[in-house]
Amino acid sequence: MSKDREFYLRRLHSLLGIIPVGLFMTQHFVVNHFATRGEESFNTAAHFMESLPFRFFLEWFVIFLPLMFHAFYGLYIAFTAKNNPQRYGTFRNWMFVLQRFSGVFLVVFIAWHVFETRFQAALGAEVNFNMMADILANPFMFAFYVLGVVTATFHFANGIWSFLVSWGITQSPTSQRISTYVTIGIFLALTVVGVQALLAFV
Amino acid sequence: MSATATKTVVLEILRQDTTDATPYWEKFELEYRPNMNVISALMEIRRNPINADGKLTTPVNWDMNCLEEVCGACSMVINGRPRQSCTALIDQLEQPVRLEPMRTFPVVRDLIVDRSRMFDSLKKVKAWVPIDGTYDLGEGPRMPERKRQWAYELSKCMTCGVCLEACPNVNSGSDFMGPAPLSQVRLFNAHPTGAMNKDERLNAIMGEGGLANCGNSQNCVVACPKGIPLTTSIAALNRDTTVQMFKNFFGSDHMVD
């Protein structure tokens, strides 16, 4: 990887984290939330999503490719940092550390999640309410999924904050502080949506 | 601590004989004097290089120049935090006072580090106002007084290296130039004559080891001894490079404006 392209790769990484990866995650959580309205509701919504036209194109260009770029380039970013929260225990430095830890965890979680659902679907399994209910019946897996949802919403919300800085939208300390509050709100709201959906399966 | 007569100052210093040598800790116990700073304590060791075990040792090497926190030469890690040793007062430090070199940089000897990479970065980003010509270029455009006052804050940077030491993304595994040279780009791009070359500086920080390596931990702004708004500089440059990026690709053949 040429170092001269670093600037563009970093900007692309920042952009893809929000559009489409973050937006897809939000949409995914909203569709999952149908589970709170019962099994049939969820199955109808899931079926609608999987019967969208151009599914192959949508999956690869809106989900898989951007997600993989964000994940693999993100791992490179995470492992080039030398974290020092013991020296500077400030809020922002902790967010910096947590963004990297949550990112690494999410690579593992999402790989597992895709293997358990989309990959199994490709092998002929049916992705429906029962599939998730079976997975989440195991208390260990339930905890793993709750952790996955919380890390994902955190990583997305904190990612919005740094997106705003990285593209030069929030410059002043005041605007950066306000956007911290706004992104905390986004984190809490999405976490509620995600965890409520998980609880609906058990 | 009982009577002042027996009051002592304990220093633990991470020493290193050469650039490649293995570092080791050495402890010193000095007689306390009022108003001591880390430099005067080090001078005391130089005068009488005997460690806490009572053994004769080599004097500790450190760098210093102005002794009033404007040159940046005496920066070191004091009790875990990078700062200038001239303004580190013994009375305000927890003991033992632990001194380490800023190991983000190559260690020359003991507490002396080689900050050349920062000066190389300043050259790379063209942190100056080019005014040389083959004829008298005359006066440049006037700078508004309020803008000058604001820019003065950015010009307080003394290239001390504390922000690089504080930054988690400046390390041996990364070639990030760090916050200090970036903020200088903002300073020189704000100058009315300097702005005539702003695209060159922006393109330089869009290259290798440049602006995009910032991960927004914002330690630099906390660490900067001169209170330079480094993170605001970085965010402002993020906007400038966003514009420059689109200009480079979609823009016309104008370079500066």
Image: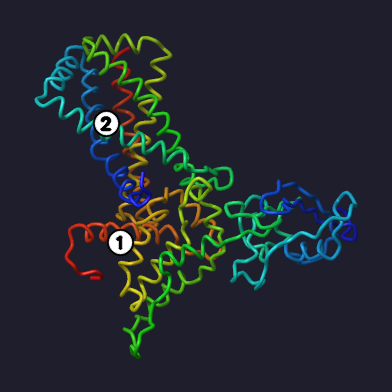
Which residue sits at x=41%, y=50%? B213
Which residue sits at x=37%, y=41%? A158
Mark 1 falls on what kind of element? helix
Which residue sits at x=32%, y=8%? A134
Q: Position of residue B5 (x, y in %)?
A: 90, 61
Q: Say which mark, if any, is on residue B240.
A: 1
Q: Name the residue under label 2.
A: A25
Residue A182 picture quarter = top left
Identify residue type, mark 2. Answer: Met
Identify residue type, mark 1. Answer: Asp
Out of A27 and A110, give the one closest to the viewer.
A110
Residue A175 picture quarter = bottom left
Q: Say which mark, if any, is on residue B82.
A: none
Of circles 1 and 2, which is in front? 1
Q: Where is residue B223 in the image (x, y as percent from the top left)?
A: 54, 57
Q: Position of residue A4 (x, y in %)?
A: 35, 52
Against B246, is B140 above or below?
A: below
Q: Position of residue B97 (x, y in %)?
A: 73, 53
Query: Disc 1 sits on a residue from what chain?
Result: B
Local crowd at mark 1 within 10 Å, few (<14), some, or many (≥20)? some
